[in-house]
Amino acid sequence: MFLDDFAYMREAIALAEEAAAAGEIPVGAVVVDRETGEILGRGRNRREQDASPTAHAEILAIEEAARRRGSWRLSGCNLYVTLEPCPMCSGAIINSRIDRVIFGAYDEKAGAVVSVQQMFRLPYNHHPRVTEGLLEEPCAAVLRSFFEQIREKA
Amino acid sequence: MFLDDFAYMREAIALAEEAAAAGEIPVGAVVVDRETGEILGRGRNRREQDASPTAHAEILAIEEAARRRGSWRLSGCNLYVTLEPCPMCSGAIINSRIDRVIFGAYDEKAGAVVSVQQMFRLPYNHHPRVTEGLLEEPCAAVLRSFFEQIREKA
């Protein structure tokens, strides 16, 4: 079915804002079934709260979607995320066979999709398609205002 | 303190054998505190049982170690794993600031440490050291015999 990419990215932005309110670096993600348009998984960064190095938005959204499907295989799904995925999350996207990744802001220091490397172009066994920079400005703005507030407090 | 790398890798092999007995691709991992020699986390592949794309041995060992420490930061730890880590797990190793990765068998198709890419040599913000091929033969043998048994059953 037709997927309104902007609407799903706005969901991801709302999750990023939730992370910011909890004092976490604001990143949000949703996993969407391309057939039905249903959101199967939602995640936002919880690294500090959970004291877990794996508690990134994408990992939590992917894990919830897999629980919903009862399968590790998320073929036929899109992942929307406000920030370019890091190597861990890009690898989880490959492992879960997600069809397409749509990200907002670029991560020049830790991005594994286009910025530091182009992981999906390497000869792994799955090659997700990519849409870069969707709603880049609002996605980046959430991060920018979070770091500005931290600097003001410091 | 002095760490007996072989002893820890044998622990990881025992976890891989546990995975095989449960019908999972046999990979095992342990996270060890380099100061005390204590095993902080153990993991073995549970992808099919948990129906989760993130349930790799390394991720589960890292998550257990982080819970034990009460921190996402596993500086001062080694990770021992029977198979070269995939991109997801290599990324989790970077994110958790693990000092050194010791792996047994090479993964020519999915390895992100030396085989398909050399992720730890890219300009990310942490560069774990690597020991390759420790107890390679017994680590590879567990995998080989698992796949032989599957072929016989098929």
Image: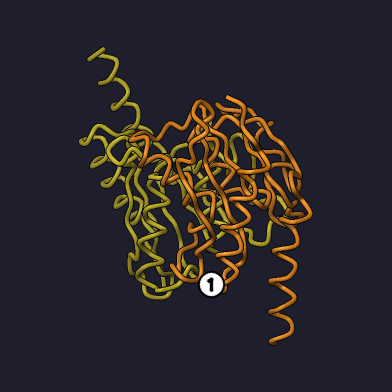
Chain colours: A orange, B yellow
Front position in the image: B131 or B151: B151
Asked which quadrant contains residue B21, the reply is top left
Front position in the image: A135 or B20: A135
Residue B23: x, y in percent?
25, 32
**Residue of label 1:** A22
Front position in the image: A143 or B149: A143
Where A149 sits versus A61, above or below?
below
Where A89 sits versus A98, above or below?
below
Residue B31: x, y in percent?
39, 60
Front position in the image: B104 or A73: A73
- Residue at left 43%, top 67%? A50
Amino acid at the residue labelled 1: Ala
Does dot 1 land on a helix, a strand or a loop?
loop
Asked which quadrant contains residue B49, the reply is top left
Residue B114: x, y in percent?
60, 40
Q: Quadrant of the C terminus of chain A?
A: bottom right
- Residue at left 56%, top 65%? A19
| A11 displayed left or right of A96 | right
Q: Chain of mark 1?
A: A
- Residue at left 74%, top 41%? A132
